[in-house]
Image (cartoon, rainbow, N blue to C red):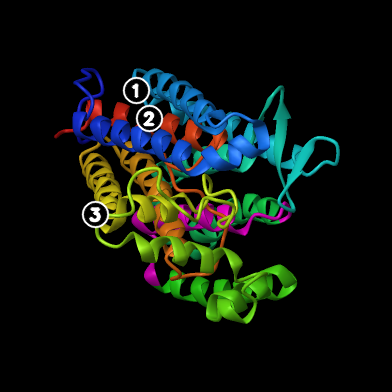
């Protein structure tokens, strides 16, 4: 034990301020980026902004509740939570239950809204992995008794997510768990072998789906198919380029006028850079770095190993997602379909992320900082 579970302190106020700032920017940018499309499709310029505000409020309530529930309780609930997530992942693949959007069966309809089971699985897996690694840390250096069982646990939900198909979310899930397993004490030599196998598997996944091959080609040379697979990245760069240092001004984006498809989602950072420029984009990235710093600090000073790994998993999940999204938007990696946490439009992603932040804030209440 490295701290005291019995006496809770105030949560990390810096982290709270950062989260509120990101949420505020998110609601404003969802409105700015979606107003034209929403007016055309729903005859309501505030359609997406109102829903994003609602998701933010629901998420903040969830964050507040989680912030006041001892994170230690999630250790006992880790197994039933994971089983529930598996049930949802399987259910979404059943025709008539899962909803198809953009070619992926990733959503389950709940009234006027929908939930994305893979988002629940990311957090469920983090909680269970933190429990597993904290209880079986002495076995993690063993290939057969620790490393391989942990990998199998990760790659089963990864396989279910790939069947939707949703490679981006699967990569975030695996990447987060690999970070946790590494910090949990796994041998570097095991990771070297895994990297070679993983590279072969990743190539196989790409070759198994023509649209993934096309995305790679579009990444290498988007101008080869400017009206097809290269369209999104070209339009994204057209948004970022004119933004310059100061941007065109809030609400003044040109790319949101039906050039960049559904700009309130995966490519919202492109519209932000166009309207608020390099300074605005850098400010958002700075906020994410502040969140990462506070999260790592909480993980390093958590009262026990479970709390450290849980905090690390939550921060790692968000950081990996931010890195992938912004890298896609600026053309560093192929398009993956990953949202930008706190900013992109979306109910399940935003709510689950805020719920996870609530758990992180609860750990900060017991951390020795």
Residue farthest toward the right in the current orientation of the protein: 96
Determine if the magenta segment contains residue 218. no
Q: CA distance from mark 1 to mark 3?
A: 32 Å
The residue that disc 3 covers is: 279
Q: Quadrant of residue 63?
A: top left
Q: Nearer the viewer, mark 2 or mark 3?
A: 3
Residue 57 percent across, percent down from the top left: 44, 21
The residue that disc 2 covers is: 359
Disc 1 and disc 3 in contact, CB within 8 angstroms: no
183 vs 270, left or right, is left
Q: Nearer the viewer, mark 1 or mark 3?
A: 3
Q: Which residues are magenta?
A: 163-188
Visible in this render: residue 96?
A: yes
361 vs 102, left or right, is left
The residue lying at 42 percent from left, 41 percent from top is 343
Circle 1 Cα neighbour tier, 10 Å, few/some/many (<14 / 14–19 / ≥20): many
Disc 2 and disc 1 in contact, CB within 8 angstroms: yes
Q: Nearer the viewer, residue 125 or 240?
A: 240
Rendered-image quadrant of the C terminus: top left
Q: How many marks?
A: 3
Precedes in sequence: disc 1 or disc 3? 1
Q: Nearer the viewer, residue 53 or 178?
A: 53
């Amino acid at each position: 034990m490295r701290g005291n579970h019995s006496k809770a302190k105030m949560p990390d106020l810096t982290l709270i301020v950062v989260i509120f700032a990101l949420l505020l920017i998110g609601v404003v940018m969802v409105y700015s980026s979606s107003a034209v499309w929403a007016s055309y499709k729903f005859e309501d310029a505030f359609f997406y902004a109102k829903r994003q505000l609602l998701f933010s409020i629901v998420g903040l309530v969830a964050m507040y509740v989680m912030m006041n529930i001892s994170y230690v309780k999630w250790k006992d609930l880790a197994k039933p939570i994971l089983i529930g997530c598996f049930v949802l992942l399987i259910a979404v693949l059943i025709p008539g239950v899962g909803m198809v959007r953009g070619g992926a069966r990733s959503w389950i309809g709940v009234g006027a809204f929908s939930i994305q089971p893979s988002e629940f699985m990311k957090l469920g897996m983090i909680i269970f992995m933190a429990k597993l690694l904290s209880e079986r840390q002495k076995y993690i250096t063993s290939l057969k008794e620790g490393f391989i069982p942990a990998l199998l646990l990760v790659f089963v939900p990864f396989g279910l997510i790939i069947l939707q198909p949703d490679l981006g979310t699967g990569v975030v899930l695996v990447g987060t768990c690999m970070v946790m397993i590494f910090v949990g004490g796994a041998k570097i030599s095991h990771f070297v072998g895994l990297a070679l196998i993983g590279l072969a598997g990743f190539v196989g996944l790409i070759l198994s789906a023509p649209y993934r091959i096309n995305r790679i080609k579009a990444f290498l040379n988007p101008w080869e198919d400017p009206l097809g697979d290269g369209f999104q990245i070209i339009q994204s760069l057209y948004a970022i380029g004119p933004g310059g240092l100061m941007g065109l001004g809030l609400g003044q984006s040109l790319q949101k006028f039906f050039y960049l498809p559904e700009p309130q989602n995966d490519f919202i950072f492109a519209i932000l850079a166009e309207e608020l420029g390099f300074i605005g984009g850098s400010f958002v990235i700075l906020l994410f770095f502040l969140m990462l710093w506070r999260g790592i600090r909480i993980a390093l000073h958590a009262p026990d190993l479970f709390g450290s790994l849980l905090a690390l998993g939550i921060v790692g999940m968000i950081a990996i997602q931010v890195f992938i999204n912004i890298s896609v938007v600026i053309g560093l990696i192929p398009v993956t379909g990953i949202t930008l946490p706190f900013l992109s439009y979306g109910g399940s992603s935003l709510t689950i992320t805020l719920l996870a932040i609530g758990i992180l804030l609860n750990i900060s209440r017991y951390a020795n900082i």
